Image: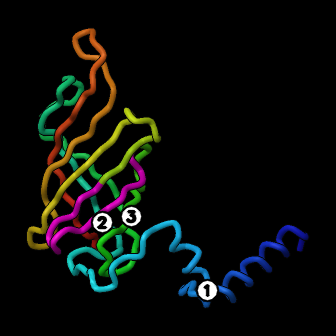
Amino acid sequence: MGKAMGRLIAAGALCMALGGGLGLSGLSAAHSQDKPAPDPGAKQTVLGPGLFVFQTRTREATCKDSEQNGYVSSYFAAIDGVPEALSMTMDLINTSYFKSWTLKVVDNVQVIGDSRIGTAADAPDIHFEVKLDKDRFKGTGYRTYNGTFEGKKTRCRVNFDALLRRLY
């Protein structure tokens, strides 16, 4: 075993010892400086970590570069986080665009998702809001990006129907 591998294993063992396994109790104070501590009493019961399908269907496109033709785009989504937490993350597995998302659960019935490509103020972004409907979440969303329409530079917007459903 090389020196680098030995150091990596030793560092991992040290982290596990300090962190108390997956609890990371010894590191939580340092981590809490990055993010505000969640309200321990704030919980939700409608969305948990797991594998989901996220689907979109175009409703309207201001730059006419997407059609309302009934075509549904489907993405495999891994939702990660603490069960019952109000905020989680979602990673879309089978796409190159808008891979990483932040999710927020509101009033134990609505999920709001946001993603962005890059950090520029005018970077492409996407947003959806879905509400629980039996065994799935249904709603609408939009994505915006800089484009050209009728020879003029403009901020384009595509509105879509959205569906989020756990895979069983």
- The answer to whether 88 appears left or right of 23 in the picture is left
- The answer to whether 49 appears left or right of 43 in the picture is right
What's the distance in space between the residues labelled 2 and 3, CA to CA? Answer: 12 Å
Q: Position of residue 33 (x, y in %)?
A: 53, 70
Give the labeled residue for mark 1. Answer: 26
Q: Earlier in the sequence, mark 1 or mark 3?
A: 1
Q: In the rendered image, which quarter is residue 117 located in?
A: top left
Q: Which mark is residue 51?
A: none
**Local secondary structure at mark 3:** strand
Q: Magenta stretch containing residue 111, yes or no? A: yes
What's the distance in space between the residues labelled 1 and 3, CA to CA? Answer: 24 Å
Q: Position of residue 75 (x, y in %)?
A: 32, 54
Give the number of the mark in front: 1 or 3. Answer: 1
Give the number of the mark in front: 2 or 3. Answer: 3
Count of residue discs: 3
Give the labeled residue for mark 2. Answer: 52
**Residue at image location 17% in from the left, 74% down from the top:** 108
**Local secondary structure at mark 2:** strand
**Local secondary structure at mark 1:** loop
- Crowdedness of circle 2 by 10 Å Cα count: few (<14), some, many (20+)? many
What's the distance in space between the residues labelled 2 and 1, CA to CA? Answer: 33 Å
User: Of the residues shown, which amino acid type is indicated by label 3?
Assistant: Thr
User: Of the residues shown, which amino acid type is indicated by label 2?
Assistant: Phe
Per the picture, the main secondary structure of the magenta-coloured stretch is strand
Give the labeled residue for mark 3. Answer: 89
Chain part drawn in magenta = 98-113
Give the number of the mark in front: 2 or 1. Answer: 1
> Residue pushed farthest top?
151
